[in-house]
Image (cartoon, rainbow, N blue to C red):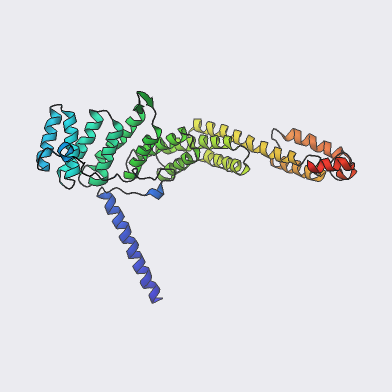
Amino acid sequence: MKRLRIFMIFALVAVSSVCMADVSSFQSGVPRYATDAYPGFDIQEGVVVSEKKKPKWFAFLNGPEKDTPFDQLQWAVACESEGAYRKARKGYDALVRNWPSSPEAPVAQERLADLELSVYENPIQAFTEYKYLLDYYSAQCDYSKVVGKMYDTARRMQATGKNICFIRFENRVETRHAYEAVVFRAPGASFAPAAMLAAARLRKADGEYDKAVLVYETLQNAYPDSEESRYALVEECETRMKILDLHGYNRTRAVDTVNFLRSALRRVVDQEDAEEITRHLAEASAKLEDEAFASAKFYDSRTRTKRNARNAYGEFLKANPEGRHAEEARARLDELAGETPADTGDGAAASLPQNEKMEESVK
């Protein structure tokens, strides 16, 4: 007992230390990467951590213009104020690459990102630069302000898309990665639920319904009191129906979908949402009934016994007494009750000539 008490004390101290370390790192502005906590997100290099910048080749062309980071920053700022944006962009980037540990580096990195967004109107590159700033200078910048810029830039990426050979594309994958990166770096931000909802919708727009469902579920679990959680519930119902349409004769999936819709109907509060989910439930229940009736008819053939057919129709009517196939099932049961063994079912195969038996076995 004494050893057990000592072990429990050490375990509690260890857990407390881990929790305190985690909280302190979050409060100090260091990004937390809980990659296993976001099912449906892409976990890939570049989304989680940016590749560290290094000095470029041909320093006489791509290197800094000044001998110190302080002078380099002043020179780049002066170029920007004079409208020499190309020189300013090159100067900021060279400072970060050649003096990454200097206090001027995070300032230059943020100004570089701002320049890409406001002057060059390139939200994709601007997002990359903001992400780099948080990845390597999270303690030297205004974390909440920068992550807010990241979210705004992600929204701009979604609005503007991507131009390739003067043709505009929606660029859904890069935009979704941007929203995912925002949630990774600021799960407690006020706009995190909106970013996660946007990521789920982009998954859905790309036809990745199973992964979209995972994101919708995570959103409802992580932010249950948010307005986005309400949208996520309704959209998850719609997405599950799309999956059911693709796998309509998968009974297990149909049963799971019906059960989920019933659960969602109990949780929803908005009347319009309830009506939409009710329509989905009716459609899913009809698919489930169709599958059950098709299974019952499977046993109603010359190769099956009459007893099996009666049992199958009976089980169907027990589960769907008022279904749209109920009348047809009852009518067929009445027919089976009036048939003789020579008509179908029990003993039918025995009364067939030898050549018909062979044909029947082939069937």
Q: Quadrant of residue 66?
A: top left
314 relative to 18, above or below:
above
Q: Left of 120 or right of it: where is 288?
A: right
Residue in view at x 47 percent, y 35 percent: 204
Q: Is residue 341 visible?
A: no
Name the one closer to the observer, 237 or 147: 147
Q: Residue at x 17, y 48 (%)?
A: 101
Q: Judge whether 3 appears above or below 252 on screen.
A: below
Front position in the image: 48 or 284: 48
Question: Which image quarter holds the N terminus?
Answer: bottom left
In depth, the one of 53 and 134 nearer the eye is 53
Question: Residue 18 sits in which quadrant?
Answer: bottom left
Please name the residue shown 29% across and 36% down the image.
127
Decide which of 363, 18 is in the foreground and name it. Answer: 363
Q: Is residue 228 visible?
A: yes
Q: Is 316 on the left or on the right of 164, as rendered? A: right
| Quadrant assignment for the C terminus | top right
What percent of the width, then of the height, locates residue 206? 46, 34
Q: How many marks?
A: 0
Where residue 17 sits: x, y (%)? 30, 61
Q: Please state if 232 lies on the left or on the right of 262 as rendered.
A: left
Query: What residue is rendered at 21% in x and 41% in y?
Result: 57
| 255 relative to 159, above or below | below
Q: Residue furthest bottom?
A: 2
Residue 4, given in percent of the width and then of the height, sits at 40, 73
Left or right: residue 182 compared with residue 116:
right
Q: Position of residue 321 (x, y in %)?
A: 71, 38
